[in-house]
Amino acid sequence: MEKLLKRKRKFLRLVLNILGVGTVGLITSCCKYGYDTTEYNVQFKGVVKSKDSSQTIPNIKVELLNSITQTSIQTDKDGNFVIIGEVLIEEYPRMRFTDIDGNLNGSFEVMDTTLRQSDFGHDLEIQMKSNE
């Protein structure tokens, strides 16, 4: 009787080991596709100024380009902005600054910038080139 129990246990161990290895192989083959899509919330604030005169520029459209949701705002009358969005963890936030009021406050070139880790937590000072 005891010998029969030992054989059953040995057989069950063998079966469970085979199933266990097979399951691990299935799990790893399923996990190798795709990638981590962890996102993080970002907030950037700063001021937009003319590169030529250092004057602040109101009514500049500020966009967070690689945000998961479409995120854009305008600078206030003093050229200040605060923009919040969600960005994938493996991407650096990219921003675009566009003059949308024509010649009212001067005419400025569109400016794209990629923010680095050192830009996080600091007020940004964006300097835009004049079109004139």
Image (cartoon, helix red, strand yellow):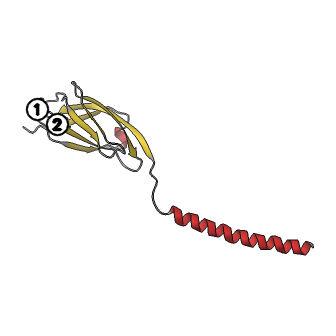
Q: Secondary structure under badge 1?
A: loop
- Give the residue furthest to the front: 70
Q: Is residue 35 left or right of residue 104?
A: right
Asked where in the image residue 65 lies, by quadrant, the reply is: top left
Q: Amino acid at mark 1?
A: Gly
Q: Amino acid at mark 2?
A: Asp
Tag 1 residue = 106
Asked whether 58 or 15 is in front, the reply is 15
Q: Which mark is residue 99?
A: 2
Asked where in the image residue 60 lies, by quadrant, the reply is: top left
- Circles 1 and 2: CB distance less than 8 Å? yes
Q: Secondary structure under badge 2?
A: strand
Please tell me how crowded label 2 is: few (under 14), some (14-19), or many (20+) other residues with Cα within 10 Å.
Answer: many
Image coordinates for residue 56, horizontal then vertical, percent? 19, 28
Q: Quadrant of the N terminus?
A: bottom right
Q: Earlier in the sequence, mark 1 or mark 2?
A: 2
